[in-house]
Image (spheres, rainbow, N blue to C red):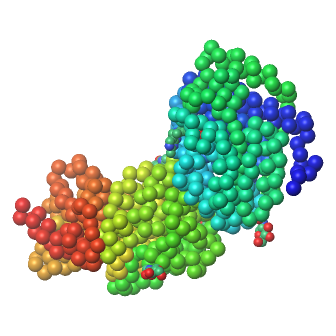
């Protein structure tokens, strides 16, 4: 289909778009020179793409970058951050970039970060932090999925990737996802400038090869000369007519475009132009500018619904009775389904494990809010980040805890973006039994504890699991909920009050000799040990942590002091980075407290859950021995 005359940019507009691109080039060269750092050549290759997108294609309110009706833009190739900032200067939203100093720019280019944590203006037009290449397209998929299926709104999602970046596997996971879910509101633009950081990329500028690959992944595709603003306007118009398929635009570009003896040559990644040459370069580019006109972006269609994702209330108490036998993974699935009734923006993503994590219960009750992400965990976390951006949804990601480790980088990025997603890892530890060591998450607590501001829940029964799910939904920032496979006793009454950072003391007497701390399956081993020890006149105090981070240091120290300073921790996790080390760190300033930790050491094996708890030293029998040992030494 040919683009109708009325949608074609007239000759004047074409020239203004070219001029805007050149102005963006000049700004990028100037700023990077002034700061002696930055990526002017990465900016330069994308200048026409940026001017066409922001001044001819995208629909948004220039005075309100976070407006829910706006088209979204994700700069996957985050090192070109400066061109995005200068585009917004040209858009007129920010007058200049007065706050930029050298370290700000380095930080911004590395992370495309929201700068508010450093007491400078927040870049309201940046939705997601991207300095690690690869996650942008999956995040864009999440935003597009939300736009199409949850918001049912007209806004579209544009994302700009580097060709070097496209060697990341997560880009291909996202391509598979985007076409499977017919995300026709999603446009990926590949800036194929032939060069990466340290050299020439494998398929150079054979844009047809990129095109075939994207087509094979089910995308509608175009190849285009990325310097030609009319051609770019044309393919973006074509793409907007296509239903049920996302579009990939493969743009042949030149790194350092417009800069003599730098354009398309190696060794210029991340280097400002030499100051003695900068003026001449800028003059040359300026000589191609013919107008001083601005263009006003088109207004968005205002059809994005108002959403409220705050203060989700538990409308009825948990239905369990003390003594019921329920696996926490199942209680988690049931709690998600209940949460979904309390707020219609709750969504759940799973990676083909829904009948193990029991997220299938949520799916059954809220099929339109369940996203099957298949076996692509990195992409699943990226999609969830995208769904949660701008507070559009309350997103829960569930899979086996072991499989979340492969999405660790995506999880880290979540904290930089101040993302608000919740991760559920089920089937943790050796207590999964027969499935064997590859499926046993024994390092997940270490991983999530290391993430800044991540709240780590490790509930021990069905009631506390339900409270954990509701607390996570109402907690800003990343949350992790660790659940277990075995069926265990319900130990709490439905009216018990749970708070983040508050442990429960569940056995207590004046004669207690040792404080024993656990969570999840080990708590039940501790209770068995406590019964046996109390028959033998050695009562112990038992603490259920509920959250591993933040850790209830006050409760731990206070109770340890009542039991002669003796603490034993028991966990279905490796020693390194787990509950034992968290407790040791918490009591490290207390000279009279001694901690002994029981944890899974070495590589486990397949077996019956109870056999494995015993084999790896975290069963009731081992707890009894440890208590006695500690008292005789
Ligand atoms: C995951 C990851 N690996 C490596 C890097 C280091 N790095 C930064 S930019 C870059 C080259 C990017 O090339 P390309 O995607 O083609 O972008 P452009 O040429 O437009 O700068 C590399 C390797 C990174 N930022 N993230
Ligand atoms: C969002 O919904 C909650 C729960 O119904 C309510 O308490 C809160 O006031 C609402 N927030 C806004 C901004 O409407
Ligand atoms: C999930 O489904 C698979 C295949 O049907 C089955 O083998 C497995 O036992 C199921 N798991 C659960 C927990 O129901
Ligand atoms: C982390 O949490 C602290 C305390 O709640 C808060 O002050 C800080 O802003 C948070 N940091 C980030 C990056 O969210
Ligand atoms: C903007 C948008 O996508 N609107 C859609 C909302 O849902 C109805 C019914 O499925 C569609 O017909 C609209 O096109």
- The answer to which quarter of the image holds residue 254 is top right
* Image height of 212 relative to 132, above or below: below
Residue at the extreme left = 632
- The answer to which quarter of the image holds residue 556 is bottom left
Query: Where the N terminus falls, by quadrant?
Result: bottom right
Q: Residue at the spot x=21%, y=50% of the render?
A: 590
Question: Percent x, y for residue 606?
Answer: 29, 73
Q: Residue at the spot x=65%, y=22% of the render?
A: 261
Q: Indicate the quadrant of ligand 3 in the picture.
A: bottom left
Question: Percent x, y for residue 196?
Answer: 57, 37
* Image height of 189 relative to 267, above or below: below
As rendered, which of 32 and 179 lies closer to the eye? Answer: 179
Apparent side of residue 142 relative to residue 527 in the rendered image (left or right) = right
Say if residue 342 shows up in the picture: yes
- The answer to which quarter of the image holds residue 141 is bottom right
Query: Where the C terminus falls, by quadrant?
Result: bottom left
Say if residue 561 shows up in the picture: no
* Image height of 97 relative to 231, above or below: above
Apparent side of residue 569 relative to residue 118 in the rendered image (left or right) = left
């Amino acid at each position: 289909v040919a683009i109708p005359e009325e949608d074609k940019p007239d000759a004047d507009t074409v020239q203004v778009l070219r001029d805007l691109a050149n102005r963006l080039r000049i700004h990028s060269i100037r700023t990077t020179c002034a700061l002696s750092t930055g990526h002017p050549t990465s900016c330069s290759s994308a200048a026409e793409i940026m001017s066409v997108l922001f001044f001819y294609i995208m629909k948004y309110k220039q005075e309100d970058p976070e407006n829910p009706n706006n088209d979204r833009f994700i700069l996957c190739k985050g090192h070109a951050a400066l061109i995005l900032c200068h585009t917004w200067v040209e858009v007129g939203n920010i007058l200049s970039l007065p706050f930029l100093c050298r370290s700000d720019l380095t930080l911004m280019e590395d992370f495309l970060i929201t700068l508010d944590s450093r007491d400078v203006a927040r870049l309201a037009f940046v939705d997601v932090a991207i300095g690690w290449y690869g996650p942008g397209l999956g995040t864009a998929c999440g935003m597009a999925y939300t736009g199409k299926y949850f918001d049912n709104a007209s806004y579209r999602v544009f994302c700009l990737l580097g060709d070097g970046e496209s060697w990341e596997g997560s880009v291909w996971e996202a391509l598979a996802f985007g076409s499977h879910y017919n995300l026709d509101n999603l446009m990926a633009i590949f800036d194929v400038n032939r060069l990466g950081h340290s050299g020439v990329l494998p398929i150079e500028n054979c844009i047809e090869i990129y095109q075939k690959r994207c087509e094979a992944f089910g995308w509608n595709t175009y190849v285009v000369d990325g310097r030609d603003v009319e051609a770019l306007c044309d393919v973006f118009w074509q793409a907007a007519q296509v239903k049920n398929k996302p579009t990939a635009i493969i743009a042949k570009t030149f790194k350092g475009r417009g800069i003599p003896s730098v354009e398309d040559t190696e060794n210029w990644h991340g280097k400002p132009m030499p100051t003695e040459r900068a003026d001449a370069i800028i003059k040359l580019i300026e000589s191609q500018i013919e107008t001083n006109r601005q263009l006003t972006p088109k207004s968005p269609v205002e059809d994005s619904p108002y959403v409220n994702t705050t203060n989700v209330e538990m409308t009825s108490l948990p239905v369990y009775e003390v003594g019921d036998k329920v696996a926490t993974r199942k209680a988690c699935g049931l709690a998600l389904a209940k949460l979904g009734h309390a707020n219609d923006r709750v969504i759940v993503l799973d990676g083909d494990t829904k009948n193990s994590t029991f997220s299938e219960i949520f799916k059954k009750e809220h099929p339109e809010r369940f996203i099957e992400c298949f076996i692509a965990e990195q992409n699943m976390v990226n999609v969830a980040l995208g769904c949660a951006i701008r507070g559009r949804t309350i997103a829960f990601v569930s899979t086996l805890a072991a499989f979340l480790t492969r999405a660790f980088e995506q999880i880290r990025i979540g904290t930089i973006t101040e993302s608000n997603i919740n991760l559920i890892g089920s089937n943790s530890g050796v207590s999964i039994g027969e499935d064997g060591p590859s499926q046993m998450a024994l390092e997940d607590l270490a991983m999530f504890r290391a993430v800044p501001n991540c709240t780590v829940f490790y509930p021990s029964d069905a009631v506390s699991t339900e409270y954990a799910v509701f607390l996570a939904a109402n907690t800003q920032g990343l949350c992790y909920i660790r659940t277990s496979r075995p069926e265990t006793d319900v130990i709490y009454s439905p009216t018990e009050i749970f708070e983040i950072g508050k442990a429960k003391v569940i056995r207590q007497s004046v004669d207690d000799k040792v404080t024993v701390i656990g969570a999840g399956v080990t708590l039940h081993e501790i209770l068995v040990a406590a019964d046996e020890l109390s028959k033998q006149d050695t009562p112990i105090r038992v603490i259920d942590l509920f959250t591993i981070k933040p850790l209830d240091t006050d409760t731990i120290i206070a109770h340890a002091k009542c039991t002669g300073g003796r603490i034993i921790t028991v966990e279905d996790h490796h020693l390194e980075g787990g509950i034992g080390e968290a407790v040791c760190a918490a009591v490290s300033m207390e000279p009279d407290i001694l901690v002994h930790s029981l944890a899974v050491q070495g590589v486990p094996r397949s077996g019956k859950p109870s056999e494995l708890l015993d084999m790896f030293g975290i069963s009731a029998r081992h707890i009894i021995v440890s208590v006695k040992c500690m008292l005789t030494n």
